[in-house]
Every structure is written in structure tokens, then in C-alpha cells.
Image (cartoon, rainbow, N blue to C red):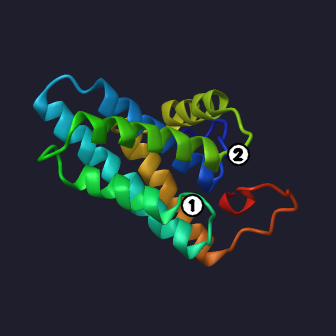
Amino acid sequence: MNPCSIPIRLTLAEFCAIALMEAADTVEAADDAAAFISALDGNEAPWLNLREIGTRDKWAVPSPRDGDRAIKCSSRLGRAVTAADIAALITINRRVAEDLVDDGDLSRIRARARLGYREGGGGDFLSWLMAQINKKAFLHLVIPPAPRRREGRHAAAR
């Protein structure tokens, strides 16, 4: 990271939300078989991490059903995946992303993440996001986050 760069402080839930949005956009934009398979593979990684983190930290989001469906569809890497499966996967990614940030503005959060990536990222954006998620998830193991005072249906996902 550039020593003169501005730190972009996003929560673990915000990084997870942006990774899901990025993965959904990549799946939706895939225009050939190779890109589609790569996009599904890229969608599986955030879901595996999110399911583990959510279970460990007792997040209300995502539901086990959503996580299982997204992972199952992504892990098939295009084999026996229907258009309806892909539409559902994209919808699940976007809905869970919105739920993770509760009332947050996803476009602003995504812009902040992109700024952080430009400041100190390497490789593709989704890989950088996954590295940030892994780093924050490890820190949550070592130093659990302070309880939030905010009341809301998804406050546990912070």
C-alpha cells in the first residue's frame, strides 16, 4: 500500500456485500463458456467465506438456504445449470448484499472499495476483495468486534 494513500475502512459485512455484487455482475456479464465458468468459480469463493463467517459470527444474513443454493449452483461450474438457476443466483447475490449493508448505500460502499483497490490493489478486483475479507475475518477471530448499539434486523451482520 502506498504510504501516502488514504485508508478505506469498510466493515467485514461491507466487503462481503461488494464481493457478492462483483460476483453477480461478473456472472451476468459472462459472454462465452470460459467466462461463464470462471464467473461461477469466482462466485463460489465469496459464498464459502460468507457462509463460514456468518456461522462463526452468528450473522442473520445470509440464510443457510441462500448460501447452500448459491454454493451448489456455483460449484457445478456450468454443468446442468439452467438460465433460471443463474437468474436466481444473481438475485440471491444482490439481495444478500443489500441485506448485509442494511440501510447502507451499496453504490457508495462499492465506490469506496474501488478507491481502496486503486490505492493498493493488485490483480483483479474480486481477488483483492477476497484478500480484504480474509484479512478482516482473521482480525475478527483475534479481536472480536465491539457490540453494535444499532438495532435493526441485520445488525448482527456488521
Q: Position of residue 24 (x, y in %)?
A: 39, 36
Q: Determine whether, in the image, residue 149 is placed left or right of residue 3.
A: right
* SS of the residue under disc 2: loop
Amino acid tagged 1: Lys
Percent x, y of residue 90: 40, 37
On the picture, is 26 further left or further right than 100?
Answer: left
Q: Quadrant of residue 127?
A: top left
Residue 133, how many percent across, how many down? Answer: 50, 55
Circles 2, 1 touching at the beta carbon (< 8 Å): no
Element marked by disc 1 = helix
Q: Position of residue 34 (x, y in %)?
A: 12, 34
Amino acid found under the numbered disc labelled 2: Asp
Q: Residues within 10 Å of mark 2 (few under 14, many from 20)?
A: some
The residue carrying mark 2 is 102
Looking at the rendered structure, which numbered label has been put on residue 136? 1
Q: Is residue 65 left or right of residue 156?
A: left
Instruction: Identify the residue at the far right of this view.
Output: 149
